[in-house]
Image (cartoon, helix red, strand yellow):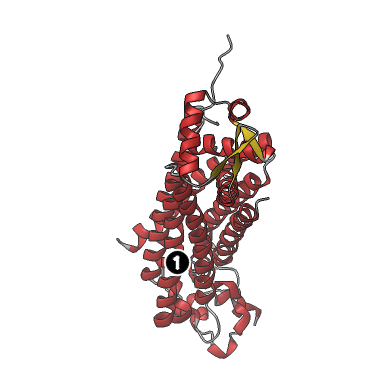
Amino acid sequence: MSRVTRKYRSSISIVADILKSIREEEKIGKTRLMQKANLPTDRMQEKLDELISLGLIAEESEEDKRLFRLTEKAYDFLREYDRTVQFLSAFGLDI
Amino acid sequence: MSQGRDLNPLGAGLQPAALPIGHPGWFRYGRCDIKSLSSCKEQKNIKPSQIKPNMFPPPFDPLFDSALELVSGVIAVLISLQAAKARSFSKERVFLAFEVSFALLGASNILRGILVLLASLTAGPLALARPFSWVADLLQAIIAALAYGILLWVQVRDSLSGKTILPQVGLLLLIPSINILNVFMLVTMTVLIFVRFLRDRNENQGLVALGFLLLACAHLSNILGYGDPFLLALENILRLSGYISLLAMLLRVRRGT
């Protein structure tokens, strides 16, 4: 009997996943972002509002489409996040 | 002269008779029936002029010992600061364990370094033979045990969650006892991290496993070193090597490699 274990994602990991998804495409729409970051609509909207208020992402309109891009602060955030993950990983742990 | 080399582990100008009971070198040198001596009388008859400055391994100088402790302590504090930064950034409580444990390790190394330094100012080369220094050793061992206990708790908790997987004699007995515990805790952590290193091939994990292994060897040298001053010097070198391995990990993390 196999047991499937779901990996717990911490709040900061979810934020990092969203930011990395945006970084990969420079500018990205909400639907595509939801697929890449694996988040449902309501959670994604909540997170996007939070990230905009924190100044980590900026919203732009292009051909009637809402697109999101990273700010400089987000790049700094991702650098610090990578260091944090590496530090914990060095001790055999996950964030 | 070669006879003198066996007699004086404390350096130039000190007669073997000055070697106090309880000094780490006493077990090896203080007894009168060691092969180079025929009697206690002969031991006491050694003149200071017969003793060479290089008769004792230089790393055992208390000031050298103190300096190595301070450097190790600073490295541990740097790791603690990185953990504090990570905790402030991520709000993850697990970093608190790293912050506290490495702060404790740093504080214990720095505390011992300062105590040995103070002792050497009053007792010179005999500093490490004074109960004052043993208290420093004991404090260091207790604080290190607490710190490793915290680190071990984090590792075990993580594995279980499935997320990733005074009297002088008393002091002398207590220090190795606590250090034996430290060796076991460090070896356990080394194995746990090394297994993950084999799985993930993450070089940083390899560096941490190596660091913990060297720290375990340092504690082992401390236990065995009560019969051999050279091993006590080796302990400092091993501990510093362990912290250098952790420093290498820290630098790699800072560089983002």
- Residue density around tag 1, few if under 14, some if 14–19, many if 20 or more, within 10 Å: many
Q: Which is more toward the observer, B80 or A61?
A: A61
- Which residue occupies 46% across, 43% down? A53
The image shows residue A89, relative to residue B3, as above or below, that is: above
Picture quarter with the N terminus of chain B: bottom right
The image shows residue B222, relative to residue B39, as above or below, that is: above
Whole-percent x, y for residue B90 in the image: 47, 44
Q: Which is more toward the observer, B207 or A15?
A: A15
- The part of the image, by quadrant, that contains residue B127 is bottom left
Whole-percent x, y for residue B252 in the image: 65, 54
Please give left or right for residue A1 compared with residue A49 in the image: right
Q: Hey, which residue is sitting farthest left in the picture? A: B166
Please give left or right for residue B198 compared with residue B85 in the image: right
- Does the rendering let one see residue B203? yes
Count of numbered badges drawn on the protein:
1
Q: Hey, which residue is sitting farthest front in the picture? A: A63
The amino acid type of the residue labelled 1 equals Ile
Please give left or right for residue B159 compared with residue B104 in the image: right
- Which residue occupies 56% across, 74% down? B37
- Does the rendering let one see residue B160? no
Whole-percent x, y for residue A91 in the image: 56, 44
Q: Hey, which residue is sitting farthest bottom in the picture? A: B49
Q: Helix or strand or loop: what does disc 1 sit on? A: helix
> The numbered mark 1 sits on a residue in which chain?
B
The image shows residue B73, relative to residue A3, as above or below, that is: below
Whole-percent x, y for residue B217 in the image: 58, 53
The image shows residue A75, relative to residue B199, as above or below, that is: below
Q: Hey, which residue is sitting farthest top in the picture? A: A1
Residue identified by numbered label 1:
B110
